[in-house]
Image (cartoon, rainbow, N blue to C red):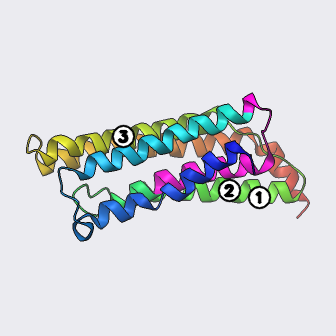
Amino acid sequence: MNVAHLFTSLRIFISPLFPILYLGSKTLGISEALLPYILLACLIVSEISDVLDGFLARKHNQVTDLGKVLDPMADSMTHISLFLAFTQGIVQLPMLWVLIFFYRELFIGTLRTLCALRGVALAARTSGKIKAIIQAVAAFAIIILMIPYSHGYLSLGQLQQWSLWIVSAAAIYTAISAIDYFYSNRLYIKKALETL
């Protein structure tokens, strides 16, 4: 366990806060006007820790196999937890789009595990990093839209429509990144599966 791993672990522990705060805001006594700011603060802390863990791992030459597994897992947990929560409440994202995020991570994670068990390491793709950035931007955008909505400057219909457009763009790129990952690593995947 090093400092980079601690920042990654922080993101993992923060991820359940999104559904707890968003779905349980009334029970917790959080006003509709305050909720977006709290969610925004949690997401900022999570994304800053994402940047810091990678920076510190490279700076101190602490890039480890554990970090390579935990980092994408923390990204997935953070974004999927947030988007799943947003299928409920005021945002009402379509579950189908959020399932694209979930199945992409499940598919890639299973491929990585199968290949690793056969001694084949699948390299990360730039499209996967872009995917994480797009999902983070989408999450920020939806939370920021909740601010004018909570003050009456944006209607519920507008909030839901704009959130749908944002998550649709993120879901489409997420699907493209899965195809890119599979196609780029197809020879390694074939090699690993042949030994099953």
Asked if disc 1 and disc 3 are in contact, CB closer than 8 Å, the reply is no
Magenta stretch secondary structure, dominant: helix
Between 153 and 160, the one nearer to me in the picture:
153
Position of the C terminus by quadrant: bottom right
134 relative position to 30: left or right: right
Asked if disc 2 and disc 3 are in contact, CB closer than 8 Å, the reply is no
Image point (26%, 63%), residue name = 25
Locate residue 95: give its quadrant.
Answer: bottom left
**Farthest left residue in view:** 152
Instruction: From the top left corner, tell me how far across and down residue 32 is, in percent.
Output: 18, 55
Q: CA distance from mark 2 to mark 1?
A: 6 Å
Residue 22 in view (yes/no): yes
> Three-letter amino acid code at disc 2?
Gly
Image point (77%, 58%), residue name = 113
Helix, strand or loop status at disc 3: helix
> Three-letter amino acid code at disc 3?
Phe
Question: How many residues crowd around disc 1 within 10 Å: few (fewer than 14), some, or many (20 or more)?
Answer: some
128 relative position to 31: left or right: right
Asked if disc 2 and disc 1 are in contact, CB closer than 8 Å, the reply is yes
Between 153 and 58, the one nearer to me in the picture:
58
Range of magenta residues:
58-80
Q: Is residue 105 magenta?
A: no
Q: Which residue is mark 1?
A: 113
